[in-house]
Image (cartoon, rainbow, N blue to C red):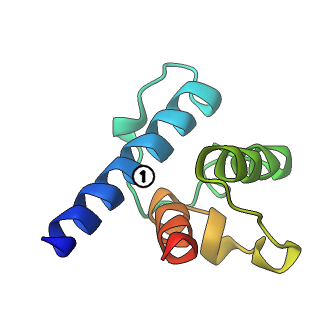
Amino acid sequence: MDNQVEVLDVALIHEQVRDFISVNFLFDGDARQIDDEVSLIEQGIVDSTGVLELVLFVEETYGLSVDHADLVPENFDSINALVGYVERRLA
């Protein structure tokens, strides 16, 4: 049962991250066109200011404090990276 709850939690986090990116960074509001592994920075979806917006989203939505050392592409450069970061921090 705990595993089902974890899967649901990750699915919810994934949906919230996609929705945030869709609303705040995509002009057409359609995040379905973004592959979960694609680099948000390389694709021009998010810039350095956008990364700060993602940090604020994570802090406000999940009650986390993002350390300066965590501001690396491995944590914030794709949808899956961001979901994985939040999941690890909440564990």
Residue 12 vs 76, above or below: the answer is above
Image quadrant where residue 31 sits: top left
Q: Residue furthest top?
A: 28
Work out whether residue 14 or residue 30 is closer to the camera in this orientation and state it.
Answer: 14
The answer to whether residue 49 is left or right of residue 33 is right
Kind of residue at badge 1: Ile
**Residue ID for mark 1:** 13
Q: Position of residue 72 (x, y in %)?
A: 74, 75
Image quadrant where residue 6 sits: bottom left
Residue 56 vs 10, above or below: the answer is above
Q: Residue furthest front?
A: 1
Q: Which element carries disc 1, helix, strand or loop?
A: helix
Residue ID at (56%, 29%): 26
All told, the count of numbered labels is 1
Residue ID at (48%, 62%): 83
Q: Position of residue 60 (x, y in %)?
A: 70, 44
Residue 15 vs 1, above or below: the answer is above
Number of residues whose C-alpha sits closer than 10 Å to that of mark 1, classed few (under 14), some (14–19) or many (20 or more): some
Work out whether residue 38 or residue 53 is closer to the camera in this orientation and state it.
Answer: 53
Q: Position of residue 1 (x, y in %)?
A: 12, 70
Residue ID at (62%, 71%): 75
Q: Position of residue 55 (x, y in %)?
A: 74, 53
Work out whether residue 20 or residue 31 is closer to the camera in this orientation and state it.
Answer: 20
